[in-house]
Image (spheres, grey):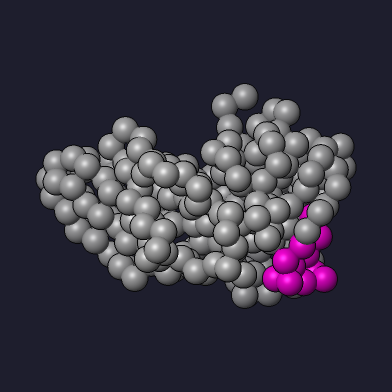
């Protein structure tokens, strides 16, 4: 296990279609985070899980977005009825202990979504 | 709420020279952490350095050092002896106790280009 893994790396979809991304965190990391990064901006927080519990959601996470972490291991992020404004890089991160108040949080390489 | 400001959209430096990337932050929290991440074209956010608000010494990690000036609310990254592989986007970020250290707030980033 060499790090946080995200699949697919790239996704092109037509407007109105549903897409799902997967994130596999570092083994035994109990926290998992999703961020969205649009062109020319820094990443923005979407949501995070502690084990299988979704503890916080950003207002950026509209009702078209849903995230799950069913067994406290991998997580999926689904976007329904995609819009062109959803085009972005979706980043996943994981940490062993709670929160970012330490140096043990690691990011994946992201999934770049393009909605045409 | 936390806010990160990076005022340099782009910086150019010659190989082997030192470079400083600016970061100012705003928070009402007394306990917080400051981070710098590197994002190469591959998309992964690579952790570089961390500074806690109560740390008395400036953080250092190899060629990276964080110039922490608490009264001025600045957390500049200094890269000594730049290398060609340092060319990338650099993001300053922070977390704070009011969020339970559960979220990172990022700046817009600075693109660093290192020339031979």
Report which quarter residue A115 is drawn in: bottom right
What secondary structure is the stretch in magenta mostly built from? loop
Q: Is residue A33 magenta?
A: no
Q: Position of residue B37 (x, y in %)?
A: 44, 49
Instruction: Say left or right for A1 vs B49.
Output: right
In depth, the one of B55 and A96 nearer the eye is B55
Above or below for A60 versus B92: below
In this view of the protein, can residue A6 be seen by the observer? no
Q: Residue at x 51, y 61 (%)?
A: B106
Report which quarter residue B73 is drawn in: bottom left
Q: Is residue A65 magenta?
A: yes
In depth, the one of A53 and A25 nearer the eye is A53
Q: Position of residue A89 (x, y in %)?
A: 56, 58
Instruction: Say left or right for B60 vs A94.
Output: left
Q: Residue at x 60, y 45 (%)?
A: A101
Above or below for B17 versus B27: above
| Residue that protrudes farthest toward the top in the picture | A1
* Highlighted magenta segment, given as a residue range: A57-67
Above or below for B50 versus B106: above
Q: Position of residue A10 (x, y in %)?
A: 57, 52
Q: Residue at x 18, y 47 (%)?
A: B18
Q: Position of residue B95 (x, y in %)?
A: 58, 55
Instruction: Say left or right for B116 vs B50.
Output: left
In depth, the one of B112 and B28 nearer the eye is B28
In this view of the protein, can residue B12 be seen by the observer? yes
Q: Residue at x 55, y 67 (%)?
A: B27
């Amino acid at each position: 296990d060499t790090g946080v893994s995200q699949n697919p790396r790239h996704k092109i979809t037509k407007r109105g279609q549903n897409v799902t991304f997967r994130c596999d965190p570092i083994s035994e990391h109990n926290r998992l985070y999703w961020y969205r990064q649009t062109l020319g901006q820094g990443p923005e927080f979407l949501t995070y899980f502690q084990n299988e519990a979704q503890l916080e959601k950003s207002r950026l996470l509209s009702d078209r977005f849903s995230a799950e972490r069913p067994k406290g291991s991998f997580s999926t992020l689904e976007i329904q009825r995609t819009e062109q404004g959803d085009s972005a890089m979706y980043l996943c991160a994981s940490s062993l202990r709670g929160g970012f108040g330490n140096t043990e949080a690691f990011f994946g390489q992201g999934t770049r979504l393009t909605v045409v | 709420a936390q806010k990160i400001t990076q005022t340099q959209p782009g910086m150019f430096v010659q190989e082997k020279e030192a470079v400083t990337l600016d970061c100012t932050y705003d928070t009402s929290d007394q306990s917080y952490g400051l981070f710098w991440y590197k994002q190469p074209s591959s998309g992964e956010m690579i952790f570089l350095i961390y500074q806690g608000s109560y740390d008395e010494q400036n953080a250092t990690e190899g060629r990276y050092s964080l110039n922490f000036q608490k009264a001025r609310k600045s957390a500049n990254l200094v890269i000594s002896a730049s290398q060609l592989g340092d060319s990338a986007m650099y993001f300053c970020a922070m977390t704070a106790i009011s969020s339970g250290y559960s979220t990172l707030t990022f700046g817009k980033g600075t693109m660093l280009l290192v020339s031979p």
